Amino acid sequence: MVKEKFYVTTPIYYPNDIPHIGHAYTTVIADVVARWNKLLGKDVYFLTGTDDHGKKIADTAEAAGKSPMEFVDDLIPKFKDAWSKMGIEYDRFIRTTDKDHEKNVQSMLQKSYDNGDIYLGEYEGLYCIGCEQYYTEKDLEDGCCPIHKKPVEKVKEETYFFRLSKYQDKLLELYEKNLEFISPPRRRQEIINRVKEGLRDLSISRTSFDWGVKLPFDKKHVCYVWFDALFNYVSGVDDKSRWPADIHLIGKDIIWFHTVYWPAFLMSVGEELPKKVFAHGWWTFDNEKISKSVGKVINIDELVAITGNKDSARYFLCRATPFGDDGDFSESALVDRHNGELLNKLGNLVSRTTGLIEKYGVEKCESGLVVNFDSINSLMQNLEIDKALNEIFAFIDLCNEYIQEKKPWATQDKKVLYELADAIKNIAILLYPFIPSTSEKIADKFGGFKFTKEGLNLPFDVNIEIKKGEGLFVRIEQEEPEAISQKSGIKKKDKKVNKEKKAEGVMTLGEVTFEDFAKLDLRVAEIKEVEEIEDADKLYKISLDVGENIGARTVCAGIKKYYSKEDLIGRKIVYFANLKPRKMKGVVSEGMLFAASTEDDSQVSLINPGEIANGSQVS
Ligand code: MSP
């Protein structure tokens, strides 16, 4: 049977510095999309690489005292290493300095020239090296490039032009005919409007430097870096029949090049057009633009080191923001996802189930825990990646609730354990594209299974020996905000009192500054379950629902004197979500509840946030 082909690409990155989280984002998503399509049984091809030519690289190399080739040769291994550290498996890493690509670019230039789409002229314009793009006066902000905020260069030289203006109507027709060509759809109109304003012919060669592909019909000129770069998508395939690409994944910054220049170049040389260009949003870091000069940059080693687990970083990038929207990265947001979702939900489900199976075994039965694959797949087809993960995690929640409800530790019901084992197998298959090494670890515990769509329907093999082994994730301790610890102003005696109270799950705030207080993450949460703790006369173990993003949390609170279990279940409260977890009477408490009390503690009242949604911030 001939497999359906699927071809996905990332932009090829400028190797002028080591890659950061923004580059990792597109590459991780491309890897997830590639793996998802492999799971569906398609013959997948995934291309990534580097954009080695251009003035920006030539200038950076010169400043570093190296030849451009030496300079990029030194950086390429850093990209390959970064992608391997993120668990990315591409089919080819293309460089625009690869000989087959250079040959392809020359042949495309010749075709376009022979078709009458390239002509010689003189260009006088304003060029931003950062963008590798010309601007007009009206595009500039205070004489600077609107993106890089740096002065543009005045350029006047003989140049070859590409007849972009000729393609205006054809492009508009393309956008009309293929509604998905510019995705997500909300980015379409802006491009259409700009194209309707009129397209000027594009300068596609330079004579003032030589770091690029020479024009085959005039060797004095080197090819404009974007003409060269875009054709990587055609040069990079292992077999011509893979073209056109099913999807080009790009950042929103380069949508114009991909949805205007690129289809026009392809029309000119008579190649088919890609089926879809999907532009995602931009990441900020602690709400600031990612930028090396202000120290707001996070490279791949740093990203992976935060949790020590590449899968947590992959999961975060996929889950934290809808694909297409901007997102903010922070260390604490990553750790929250790692602890709250991967460890508390997935890790606990797997460790509880495997532990019980080790003790009691499984017995085959019809499973009631069924995951809706079609619905997840249709989200993946629309690149609603965060929603697909959300749905898989809703299934994990369901399994966790099932354990609580069926209590197999008490009933020793082997059929319930079989259902859970089968569900975990399916969860591992579905999560494989997102967090492949974690899925492999799960498969190992379960005697190994394949990550294919068909595997979802294969019943779980009861003869396999299941091993609990090590946990999938290690909890990451977050720093406790100073406000809560020993901040100035609390007298020694008070401190002691505070310490005693701390053991009861109660703390009072001393004199804190506003900055200290602002570090606290207060959230609306709902009490789902209340349990006694052995040997504790004041403490309850309380399970909370802190909304979709944070998830389930457990806290120990010294409020037994004031509230019965029934009083508490279903109650909305205010929860301190970013305190360092601590063990109390053998139970890990992940934060505290907010309450008012009289001086002598004879009365305590939990603060009531009303019917505000779980997870909402209290500020
Ligand atoms: N070389 C061109 C692309 C040529 S494709 C034929 C280029 N390279 S780049 O190194 O500047 O990388 C651009 C891509 O990196 C963006 O489109 C985006 O995919 C990714 N990102 C870089 N910074 C980013 C963020 N801060 N956030 C998200 N992605 C960003 O342009």
Image (cartoon, rainbow, N blue to C red):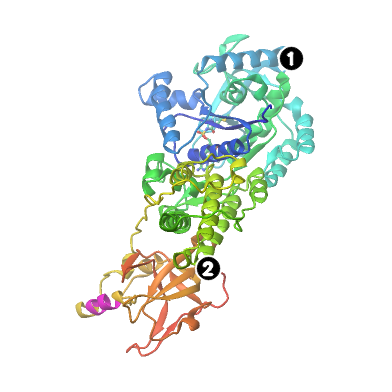
Q: Residue 405 carries which label?
A: 2
Q: Which amino acid does label 2 sit on?
A: Glu
- Classify mark 2: helix, strand or loop: helix
Magenta-colored stretch includes residue 277: no
* Mark 1: amino acid: Asn
Left or right? Give the position of 366 relative to 56: right
Q: In this view, does 606 lie above or below 1?
A: below
Q: For the point 53% across and 39% down, which residue is it?
A: 450
Residue 97 image position (x, y, % from top left):
50, 18
The residue carrying mark 1 is: 115
Residue at point 45%, 42% (across, down): 437
Magenta-drawn segment = 495-501
> What secondary structure do most residues of the magenta stretch adopt?
helix
Q: Position of residue 498 (x, y in %)?
A: 27, 77
Instruction: Rate crowding at label 1 as few (under 14), some (14 to 19) or many (20 or more) other CA atoms within 10 Å.
Output: few
Q: In the rendered view of the protein, which quadrant contains the N terminus?
A: top right
Ligand 1 lies under 8 Å from the Cβ of mark 2: no
* Alpha carbon separation for disc pair 2 and 1: 71 Å
In the figure, residue 110 lies in which quadrant? top right
Dividing the picture into quadrants, the one containing residue 382 is top right
Q: Is residue 523 left or right of residue 591?
A: right
